[in-house]
Image (cartoon, rainbow, N blue to C red):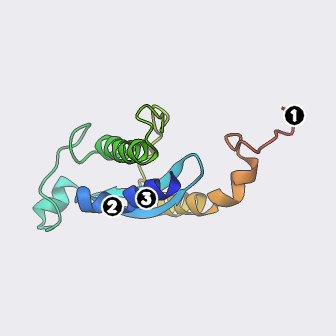
Amino acid sequence: MGEIALEEWLAGPVHRREIELGKFCLMPNHLHAIVSIVTHAQALEGDPRVAPTPRGPGRGSIGALVSGYKAAVTKRYRREISEPDAVVWQRNYYEHVIRDQEDWYRIEEYILANPRRWAEDAENPSYIASSGH
């Protein structure tokens, strides 16, 4: 599953020319990533990678990226394990718009440090909370 998720993530810019991948970390049960979306203004400035794209839930949006990525991973996983009804993803996702360089660096550090925190992650099946549960 992890190999499929990684391969599909890295293939994202091939299928979605309007995105650039930044730092990312694929964890056992989730993905943290920075994604840049080439804006309409960049396209107007002559950026050859992409034609102008609309904002919002349509093509070129973060929602379209997440939806397409989840669909690609799910389709491959179901096909490769021969389990057509396998549930692969949780229903939603969390997003944060990075507004400045300080925020960018803070989020990069969070992503890069995430594997060190896995042992204490409540979503880790091996984690036993200090409360004894």
Is residue 15 left or right of 118 when viewed as pictured? left
Measuring from the top left, give residue 93's x and y in whole percent. 46, 38
The answer to whether residue 38 is visible is no
Q: In percent of the image, x 38 and y 56: which residue is there?
A: 8
Q: Earlier in the sequence, mark 3 or mark 1?
A: 3
Q: Amino acid at mark 2?
A: Ala
Report the mark closest to the observer, 3 or 1.
1
The answer to whether marks 1 and 2 mark residues whose Cβ atoms lie closer than 8 Å is no
Q: Which mark is residue 100?
A: 3
Q: Earlier in the sequence, mark 1 or mark 2?
A: 2
Is residue 124 left or right of 104 when viewed as pictured? right
Measuring from the top left, give residue 109's x and y in whole percent. 58, 63
Q: Amino acid at mark 1?
A: Ser
| The C terminus sits in image quarter | top right
- Residue 16's image quarter? bottom left
Task: Identify which residue, 81 or 119, lies in the foreground.
Answer: 81
Q: In percent of the image, x 54 and y 47: which residue is there?
A: 30
Q: Which mark is residue 11?
A: 2
Callout 3 secondary element: loop
Report the mark closest to the observer, 2 or 3.
2
Q: Earlier in the sequence, mark 2 or mark 3?
A: 2
Q: Which residue is mark 1?
A: 131
